[in-house]
Image (cartoon, rainbow, N blue to C red):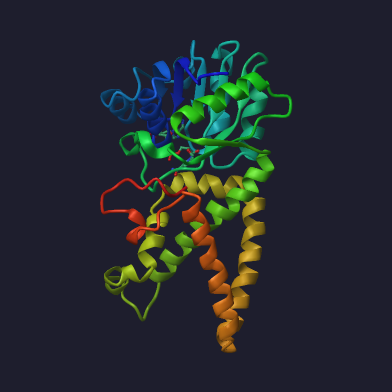
Amino acid sequence: MSDGHFKKIALIGVGLIGSSISHAARRGGLVDSITGHARTAETRDTAVRLGLIDTAHATAAEAVQDADLIILCVPVGACAKVAEEIAPYLKQGSIVTDVGSVKESVVNDVAPHIPSGVHFIPGHPIAGTENSGPEAGFAELFDNRWCILTPLDNGDAAATAKLKAFWQALGSDVDVMTPQHHDMVLATVSHLPHLIAFNIVNSARHLEQVTDREVIKYSAGGFRDFTRIAASDPVMWRDVFLNNKEAVLEMLGRFTEDLTDLQRAIRFGDGDKLERLFTEARGVRQGIVESGQDTAAPDFGRHAGANEPASE
Ligand code: NAP
């Protein structure tokens, strides 16, 4: 069985996810050296200063040379261009993976560029925070969170097993599914909730009868928890919605129907219905706490300033 160790890892993108992979890989002794590329010199310099990468490269092509594991940690919309650029420089037998929040579009964008003899195995850790950049990462981000791999139909089983062992050694549990199924599941548990949070926060901003000051002052009434999700990186989320259009629109259609149902129950004073629906929803929360994906502690166990490995 593979131990998940790689001699040389290349991180293309050293933001929240790339830097957390570096912290967790170093913690587990999973790698001898890490090279990295980011778009700006500022991020590259910060990544070297923090010890996230041993060498920084101005191009992705330079960063991947001689690497055994290449991890694309850039926004989903940037994957095609990066894959095209690195393709001629990939070592035979190496593994290319990604961490993108959408899988079918990444498969379509990246797979055609990967040369034979190189293993492309798409992946997505279901772990994150609303923070971005190389300073946002921490080693515990993936502990007890799920990582989903969506291997290609003709993929190499041994390479998939090695990548699975790597993610397990980073602290994750690993599931395998098709890219299409991944995109529908994530539209439900992540993309739609983020869309709703972005929308609720903006709706509150545009109110005339309630001032911005009141919205902030009384935010502990529920609004505050939506603002944390809505503080997530706008570029990352733009790319998620552009690339998971069908699944998100399907979920949005269902959500709108259910919302209309609630609207009618309120309009016609149907208290029994409201109580039944709220009771069912409450049960989902209990299931999440029981499965160890969140804590039942007051304030969700989160404290001001603490990292919150809870959202994606
Ligand atoms: P992030 O903190 O904003 O970091 C993005 C990194 O990619 C930065 O190093 C950035 O470099 C680099 N980058 C951006 N565009 C690039 C380009 N065109 N070419 C080369 N490098 C580029 O983002 P993140 O949160 O780590 O997200 C990265 C990926 O992880 C996304 O695909 C996202 O869907 C996925 N993901 C995110 C979360 C989450 O909660 N945030 C969770 C799971 C998966 P500069 O800093 O120099 O611009």
Q: State which quarter of the image contains the N terminus.
A: top right
The x and y percentages for residue 43 are 33, 30
Q: Is residue 195 visible in this depiction of the protein?
A: no
- In this view, 299 is above or below 150: below
| Residue 272 picture quarter | bottom right
Compare residues 113 and 48 and report the one nearer the observer: 48
- In this view, 309 is above or below 277: above
- In this view, 202 is above or below 116: below
Q: Quadrant of ligand 1?
A: top left
Q: Is residue 165 left or right of residue 119?
A: left
Q: Is residue 247 left or right of residue 26?
A: right
Q: What's the residue at 56%, 50% (across, down)? A: 241
Q: What's the residue at 50%, 30% (across, down)? A: 168
Compare residues 120 and 57 and report the one nearer the observer: 120
The x and y percentages for residue 150 are 64, 34
The x and y percentages for residue 223 are 38, 67
Furthest toward the bottom, the residue is 268
Q: Is residue 294 visible in this depiction of the protein?
A: yes
Q: What's the residue at 49%, 35% (across, down)? A: 172
Q: What's the residue at 46%, 49% (across, down)? A: 292
Furthest toward the front, the residue is 290
| Residue 180 picture quarter | top right
Say how many tags the image has.
Answer: 0
The x and y percentages for residue 104 are 65, 39
